[in-house]
Image: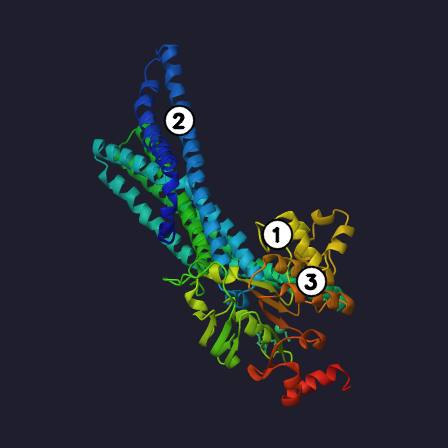
Amino acid sequence: MKRFLPYLKYLRGHRTYLVFALICGAISGLVFGRGLPVVINTVFPRIFTDGPRTLPTSEIVGYALLIPLIFFIRALTGFLNNYFMSRCGIGVLETLRVELYRQLQHLPLSYFGKNRTGDLLSRLTADTQVVQQTITSSASDLVIQPLTLVGAFSFLATIALQHDGVVLFLASLAIVPLCVLPVRYVGKKLLKRADENQRLLGDISDLANQNLMGAREVRAFGLEEKEVDLFQRTTRRLFLVQMKVVKYSQVLSPTIEFIASLGIAFSLYYAYNAGISLTVFTSILTALFACYEPVKKLGALHGQFTRGAASLNRIEEILHEPISIKDPPQPVEVPRRLRGEIAFEGVEFDYIPGEPVLRSVTTRIPAGTVCALVGPSGAGKTTFANLVPRFYEATGGRVTVDGHDVRDLRLADLRRNIALVSQDPVLFNDTIYQNLLLGRPDATREEVMAAAIDAHADDFIRNEPDGYETVVGERGSRLSGGQKQRLALARAFLRNAPILILDEATSALDSQSEQLIQEALRKLVVGKTVLIIAHRFSTIRDASMILVFDRGEIVATGNHGRLYDTSPLYRSLYDRQHGAA
Ligand SMILES: Nc1ncnc2c1ncn2[C@@H]1O[C@H](COP(=O)(O)OP(=O)(O)OP(=O)(O)O)[C@@H](O)[C@H]1O
Ligand SMILES: [Mg+2]
């Protein structure tokens, strides 16, 4: 229960509804808990007299109608309470979901390396769903049931005073703590199972996610049955855990009912000895019934809260994750457009602590330089490029742009000045036009088309059935690798940023298109700092500066001619590609 308190602040916008709901709940609870026994106690003796029955019809009808009236008031206020409490609860949940999503937008990329997409998805959907269930079920019971209890107790207390039945009253009170015991016991068991349940759901979501992403590989390697088997084993574990959850949450109500029946047995015995009349006893029974119902419901609610808490824990693991890459408290003010000088000063970096990927990397790339990064696969070229937009944080040394440590700049200021074509560019499931526009949302249609022409994408786009309005499919799956790459290039060209990072940006193109794009690039890169990562030396040869990477270090710097003569690694990489010509 108290796990949910911090989120009450989200109720602020729903205050009016909340107050209204609470009032309705109070009426509903009291009318049932106290009103019903009172009616029975005062009206029944007038109806069930021992003598001749002489009441006028109108009066007896009036008495009879009192009971449906009470149920009607309970039903109406109960409904209103439920409706408006749920409204508040679901409203709070909406805020929570959006907070969670916002947090996911700002978490550093390293977070996604450590966490599984499917599991995150499941937290975003399945776990928020459980919290929602908790909120809606508590909405109907959290106010009404305790107040029903209060109403019924107040009636029992009155009766106890009238009939000297203090013992009876105390005995019925004693039942409550007796009921709390199983509630607590089950709660503890349930928390563990509920947590396991949600984790397994996360695993399943993750399995499914990976499987669907790799649909082609599954078929290519004949993994269909193996995948089903794996899935089935996980769902089997889920089945077992779910049955335990069912067991623990369903055992409560019957237990409490049984304890309650003991209370009734006791009061029957007591009523006989105390000479209590049938009418009074009936009203006591009604009040007792009105007591046990809330205890039972509150017990079930406790179980639901426990399940909700398990899911909330998983949601909070995301919400409370520190955003390590964020704007500095006092950002340096920079012009809107940076010049684009990049420098690395003794930069160290690792993805996994203890496994350095960049080792004291120092270099300076003057503004307006076309700089190529070469080196064997896994040498750290992409990693080097990732540190410039501050996708990851250097663990040692510093990265500067125009002399400012990237950590001193606002992320928006820094990233606005960088255009990136990554090693596997992602397009969103939208039209080609919208995908291009991401490069610069305020670009005109002419500018978008000019960028497409420069990237040699315009031709194929016009051949698509809907031209620029063609929808590209999930991650751009309806396009060929080369087409995707051209769109990614066009998007980067459109951005027109002073720093351009091209990571294998032309690797999927045929050599003729690559050559054409090279020409376009020559025009576009004027005045820009360009980092080109490429395995093809046709792209590299023209660069005015080349950095040779090997196992996380820059082992040589220079232009093609110089490196060919002085760097054995560069020479061997080059010769291998040119068949040692
Ligand atoms: N997200 C990651 N988590 C952990 N290790 C990583 C991650 N990305 C890269 N690495 C490791 O860092 C090293 C450098 O990777 P990087 O991607 O920078 O190489 P690269 O030079 O770009 O190679 P390629 O030419 O194949 O693209 C590799 O050993 C790789 O295993
Ligand atoms: Mg790479």
Q: Residue at x 56, y 71 (%)?
A: 385
Q: Is residue 293 left or right of residue 216?
A: left
> What numbered label is drawn on residue 215?
none
Question: Looking at the image, which residue is at 68% across and 77% down?
Answer: 541
- Please state the horizontal and vertical placement of residue 232, each as a whole percent of the image: 65, 62
Locate residue 260 relative to residue 165 in the image: left or right.
Answer: right
- Mark 1–mark 3 Cα distance, whole angstroms, equals 15 Å
Residue 150 vs residue 554: left or right?
left
Q: Residues within 10 Å of mark 1 (few under 14, many from 20)?
A: many
- Residue placed most toward the observer, 434 or 494: 494
Q: Closer to the camera, 392 or 221?
A: 392
Q: Secondary structure at mark 2?
A: helix
Give the image quarter of residue 230: bottom right
Q: Which residue position is annotated with label 2?
A: 73
Seen at 57% across and 51% down, the residue is 441
Q: Earlier in the sequence, mark 1 or mark 3?
A: 1
Residue 55, x across and y down, in percent: 35, 12
Residue 286 spot, x, y in % from top left: 36, 33
Mark positioned earlier in the residue sequence (1 or 2): 2
- Give the quadrant of the C terminus: bottom right
Q: Which mark is on residue 485?
A: 3
Residue occupied by mark 1: 437
Disc 3 element: helix
How many residues crowd mark 2 within 10 Å: few (<14), some (14–19), many (20+)?
some
Check if mark 2's residue and mark 3's residue have beta carbons within 8 Å. Answer: no
Quadrant where ligand 2 appears: bottom right
**Closer to us: 554 or 197:** 554
